[in-house]
Image (cartoon, rainbow, N blue to C red):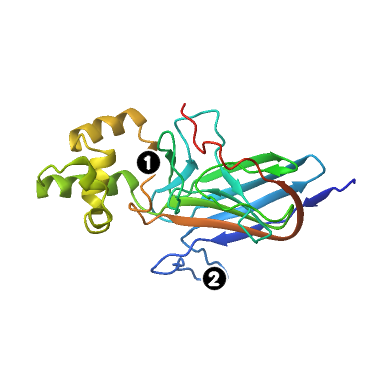
Amino acid sequence: MNRNICFLFVLTLCASFPNGAQAENSDDPNNVVEKVVTIELNKLNLNDTTLELSYKIKNNTDHDVWICDTINADNRSYKQFEVYMPEDDQTLLIRRRLDVPTVLVWASHPRGRYVLLRSGQELNESLSLDVPVQRQYGFASEQATSDYARRLVLEIGFYNEDLPGMIREIIEVAEKLNCASLEPKEYMTSLFKHYFKGIWIVHMFFGGGLSNFEEWLSQQGGEEIRIPYTWQNLGSEHVLRIEVDGVHIPYEEVDLNLVPFPKS
C-alpha cells in the first residue's frame, strides 16, 4: 500500500464561553475579531509510516490564559497526549486535558502542566505518531473495536482565567473557614468531595496552606503551573477542538493492563 495523504488547509475553531464571543468596535464592519482563544490546523500529513500534524493556538482575548502542555509533567519519558479510539467508534481521539472522567487507578497520581499564554500571543506546536497508531494511556478505559479511524479529533484543555489566582482563592477561603481536621478516609467520601470540594482540593493537593502554595508557585517561575488530577473536582477547564473527517488511519490496541502513568 502506498498512500500519501496531505491536508494543507487552515481550520479555525473557537472555544465556547458562557458569555459568548465579543467583537472589537471598528468603523469597518468587515474588520471583526472575536476575543476568544482559537486553534488553527496548519498541516495534517498521513503516510504509510507516520501521522504528523501541526497547529497554532492564539490568545485573542484581553487577558492571560493557561494552556494544558502535558498530562503527566512528572515523567519526561511519557507522551504529552492521550491517544485512543472510543469503543464502537471510528474516531482517533488525541487529547491533552485533565478535566476528564476516569475509572483507572495509577501507581502515582498524574499531574498536568499548564503554561501561560498572554494576550495576543501565539503557540505553535506539532506532533508525530507512528502508523499504525498505538494507544497512549491517560484516563480513558475504552477499548477500540475497529482497526481504522475514519475521523481525527484533537482536544487541548485550557483555563480562560488566572489559574494560579483561582487556586489561591480556594486555599484562602479554606483557611478562613478553619475547618477541623478529619480522618484521611473522610476526605475521600463522595459526600465530602461533592459538597466540600474546595476543602478537598486543598487537603489532597495543597495541604501545606497558602504560604506553602506561594513558595511552590514561585519555584515554577510564573510561566507554568502543575495541577494534580482532581477527578473533575477543580472544573472550569475549556476545550480547544479540531475535527477532521474522511481520513483512513490504521490503529492498534495495546494491553490495557499496563500502568497508564508509570512512576518517574
Asked if residue 170 shows in the view, the reply is no
Q: Nearer the viewer, mark 2 or mark 1?
A: 1
Q: Earlier in the sequence, mark 2 or mark 1?
A: 2
Q: Quadrant of residue 126?
A: top right
The residue singled out by tag 1 in the image is 227
Residue 12 as seen in the image, left or right of residue 226: right
Up/down of 174 relative to 226, above or below: below
> Of the residues shown, which amino acid type is indicated by label 1?
Ile
Residue 199: x and y, percent?
Answer: 21, 48
The residue singled out by tag 2 in the image is 28
**Mark 1 Cα-neighbour bin, 10 Å: few <14, some 14–19, many ≥20:** many
Residue 120: x and y, percent?
Answer: 47, 49
Residue 232: x and y, percent?
Answer: 38, 53
Secondary element type, mark 1: strand
Residue 126 as seen in the image, left or right of residue 19: right
Asked if residue 55 shows in the view, the reply is yes
Up/down of 31 relative to 141, above or below: below
